[in-house]
Image (cartoon, rainbow, N blue to C red):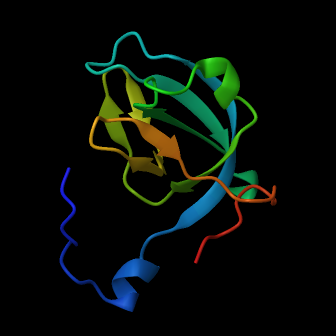
Amino acid sequence: MSDNIKAETTWNGFQKLDIRTGTILKAAIFQEAKNPAFKMEIDFGALGIKKTSAQLTKIYNPEELVGKQIIAVVNFPSKQIANTMSECLVLGAVEPDGKVTLLTSEKIVPNGIPIG
């Protein structure tokens, strides 16, 4: 990980990302993943339920993830990870040692609310 700021982008570049709130419905150890990760199903309200995987195993367990409202990018193309299609990218703060702390909303809001 680097402390360097990435290349400058434009406001239009940022607006292309569809970042939304969602609530984790299911989380389980992703046995087939190359790196330790969880498989999750996340409720994005009117956008439906999306599947993903995330390398959150250093500081979370599946039980504490269920019910947590998170922030995710929902408009990336689906990506095959082992035997699962990842349909969104859960956002988190990544420390140099690989620990990921999920980004969440301060207060609970409806699932699927855009972040901007």
Q: Quadrant of residue 50?
A: top right
Between 20 and 3, the one nearer to me in the picture: 3
Quarter assignment of residue 49 = top right
Q: Residue at x 53, y 54 (%)?
A: 72
The residue lying furthest to the bottom in this view is 11
Q: Position of residue 71 (x, y in %)?
A: 58, 55
Q: Position of residue 103 (x, y in %)?
A: 56, 52
In the image, farthest residue toward the top = 31
Q: Residue at x 80, y 59 (%)?
A: 107
Image location of residue 63, percent across then percent down = 68, 19
Q: Position of residue 68 (x, y in %)?
A: 71, 39
Q: Quadrant of the C terminus?
A: bottom right
The residue under the point 50% across, 25% down is 39
What residue is shown at x 22% (from left), y 72% (from top)? 5
Q: How many marks?
A: 0
Residue 103 relative to residue 35: left or right: right
Vertical relation: 15 (above or below) 89: below
Rendered image quadrant of residue 43: top right
Is 116 rendered above or below residue 22? below
Q: Nearer the viewer, residue 33 or 6?
A: 6
